[in-house]
Amino acid sequence: MDNIYMYYFSGTGNTLYLVNQLKECISEIIIIPIASLLDVDDIVIPKSKTIGFCFPNHAGHIPIPIKIFLEKIRLEGDEYLFAICNSAFSKCFAPDDFVKILKKSGCRLSAYFNLIMPDNHTIVAKDYKIPDKEEFKKCEDQSQEKLSHIKEVIMNKEKFIEKDDKPAPFPVWIDKILGPIIFFLIQKHPSILLKGRLYADSKCNSCKICEKACPANRIVVNHSRPIFDYKISCFGCYGCVNFCPVESIQVASKWFNGRSYSSKNSRYPHPYASVKDIEKQKTKGI
């Protein structure tokens, strides 16, 4: 079988773990991080008839970097495309997102899978708890059980769109009206929403881990403090928050997020992913 190119985006390691597991299951897969390609104007992907995408659920939709990538790539129109989304508790409308973006190229999403992974995003919520070993083991076992089915579907190029029965993260009017406005502003006019959104408190020890982990390259540690460039779009992955070893990076309260409890909550980076693994996503040519 020809090579299968698997493009992925991972903020704190959940997706990275899944693509590595899939690679072990399907040797033909070549893993490519999307973060290393986003500053390329015209992305030419290798010739392949089987192309996959793996990503986390962000507020019920595909993450901003996945959207940017899909809008840039050139497809011939006859590729077999599959997607694997991981989320903790809310429905993701990724298939609909793919339809909207890919219709210009005449492509369709042939297969779509949902996988449950530990929550790393509601750190802003009151009483957020990082997953314990038992919860993580459940997610790990579930993903392992589904890998054989995913492999069979992909290798046989079957059509399969997994139903997502989880509740939608927001009411319909927010998702259809307010959501697109927020995503548009974050992409096109980030300073409107991002100024002061993230900050380092007094616990900061200038280790530069937040700078290394940020896939958007919007953090620079200057004069021993991280500076967040609010003119650059944030990917909303919270990698800087979750990988901070002293829990210094905080999420500020904003009107669309309500009150933030990040300063009171623990952090969750995936136990099998290191800062070096996340930073490597930005390296070109891998």
Image (spheres, helix red, strand yellow):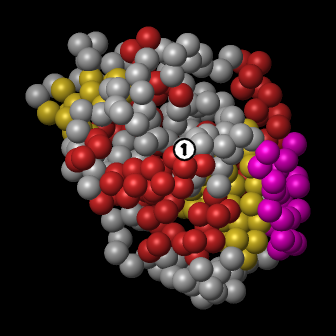
Tell whether position 132 is magenta.
Answer: no
For the question of whether residue 87 can be seen, the reply is no
Q: Is residue 145 above or below residue 32?
A: above
Residue type at tag 1 = Ala
Toward the viewer: 127 or 175? 175
In the image, the segment drawn in magenta is 145-165
> Looking at this rendering, what residue extends furthest in the front direction?
173
- Residue at 76 percent of width and 71 percent of height: 110
- Residue labelled with disc 1: 59
Q: How many C-alpha atoms fall within 10 Å of the one at disc 1: few (<14), some, or many (≥20)?
A: some
Q: Label 1: state its secondary structure.
A: loop
Q: Is residue 155 above or below residue 191?
A: below
- Residue at 61 percent of width and 67 percent of height: 98
> Looking at this rendering, what residue extends furthest in the left direction?
223
Q: Is residue 261 above or below residue 24?
A: above
Q: Is residue 139 above or below residue 194?
A: above
Residue 160 is situated, as x and y percent measured from the top left of the image, at 83, 65
Residue 30 is situated, as x and y percent measured from the top left of the image, at 63, 64
Q: Is residue 52 left or right of residue 141?
A: left
Residue 223 is situated, as x and y percent measured from the top left of the image, at 11, 28
Q: Is residue 169 left or right of residue 139?
A: left
- Residue at 27 percent of width and 23 percent of height: 200
Where residue 252 sits, quadrant-wise, is: top left
